[in-house]
Image (tube, helix red, strand yellow):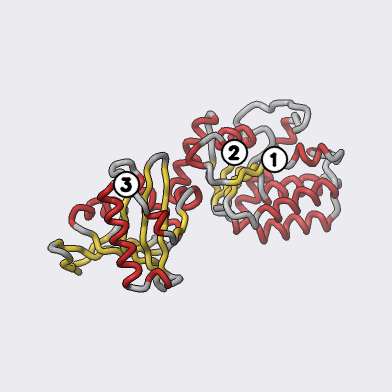
Amino acid sequence: MKIAITGAQSTGKSTLLRFLKQDEDLKGFEYIDELTRKIAAKGININEEGSNMSQIFTITIHAENIIKDHFISDRCALDGLVYTRWLYDQGKVSKWIMEYAKGVADEVLPRYDYIFYLPPEIPIEDDGIRSADESFRKEVTKLFEHYIDRYKLKVFELTGSVADRAKTFKRILQPKMLFSVGLTEVDSLFDLTSVDGRTDRYLTDAYKYWVEKKYVDDESSKIYMSKIESNVGWAFVRETEHGVHLSRFTVEKKGSGLCGKIIQGLKSRYNSISLWSNPEALEFYKRNGFNFTGMKNKVDGKIYTYGVWKINK
């Protein structure tokens, strides 16, 4: 997942990034710090005194960052475009630099999964690096609003204290968070071992079924595992043309919320999920958006009902 935190200078982006780094739920991300200090450390002028050289560094790094897999970045290609435009309007960078910034933005901006925008609601802090000019920040803010509208970007605004912003950030990210922080593919019987005897027997039977059906050798058949604190869960899935079929699914400790998180993780990866639910799990799947048909199947004395979840487009 590719995530950016954007906005004018002194809006709390770096503070928020530091706060998010401490969150255990987000440990799977790579964190990309602000570029300004790194560029200034090279002896290159920044802020209102930026130049062709400062913008070459900035824009190119944003272009390079987008190829990373799972990251949360302080600033993004939108920032590169906004500040380059301000400098261009002041006659401080060349036209080709402006065109370069726009070209990178055209290519890179659609590739972010989430862009979080921080409005200028806190006082400017003069730390000797960032600009303390309030009029400069206002002009830059207008450019952010202009390009967000021009590119029709879906941005999520974060306001309030840093804790409030982090809470909103996680709430918005929640449907896709599990995939980015721990839904991993496994193919070893060792990875299916549970300390709970009943769960361990279930996993052994599930793997035997996987082998008997030759799913173990099929690239479209996958086993995912997820860990949250001391709890572990597994999902056996078979990919189809339009989505995935959930064949086997269990966790060591029920009631911890891990089941729902794994389902959300699968939803983040696939457009549809089909399954046969036993009576005990039927209400759980309904709460998670599955619709059930009249198709039923009897296995080992239990009646299983066919259900499907599909992404809303």
User: Which sits in the foreground, 134 or 13?
Assistant: 13
User: Which sits in the foreground, 134 or 307?
Assistant: 307
Res 266 visible? no
Choose mark 1 or mark 3, whichever is in front: 3
Name the residue at 38% across, 52% down.
262
Mark 2 touching mark 1, by CB under 8 A? Answer: no
Name the residue at 18% across, 56% down.
279
Mark 3 touching mark 2, by CB under 8 A? Answer: no
Q: Position of residue 208 (x, y in %)?
A: 31, 65
User: Which sits in the foreground, 69 or 206?
Assistant: 206
Q: Amino acid at mark 3?
A: Glu
Q: Which residue is mark 1?
A: 34
Q: Position of residue 277 (x, y in %)?
A: 24, 60
Q: Amino acid at mark 2?
A: Leu
Q: Callout 2: helix, strand or loop?
A: loop
Q: Position of residue 39 (x, y in %)?
A: 80, 41
Q: Alpha-carbon distance for marks 3 and 2?
A: 40 Å
Numbered mark located on residue 252 in the image: 3
Q: Position of residue 263 (x, y in %)?
A: 36, 54
Q: Amino acid at mark 1?
A: Glu
Res 177 visible? yes
Q: Which residue is mark 2?
A: 118
Is 247 above or below relative to 147?
below
* Left/right of residue 270 with respect to residue 284 in the rendered view: right
Q: Earlier in the sequence, mark 3 or mark 2?
A: 2
Is 122 above or below relative to 175?
above
Name the residue at 25% across, 50% down.
198
Q: Alpha-carbon distance for marks 2 and 1?
A: 14 Å
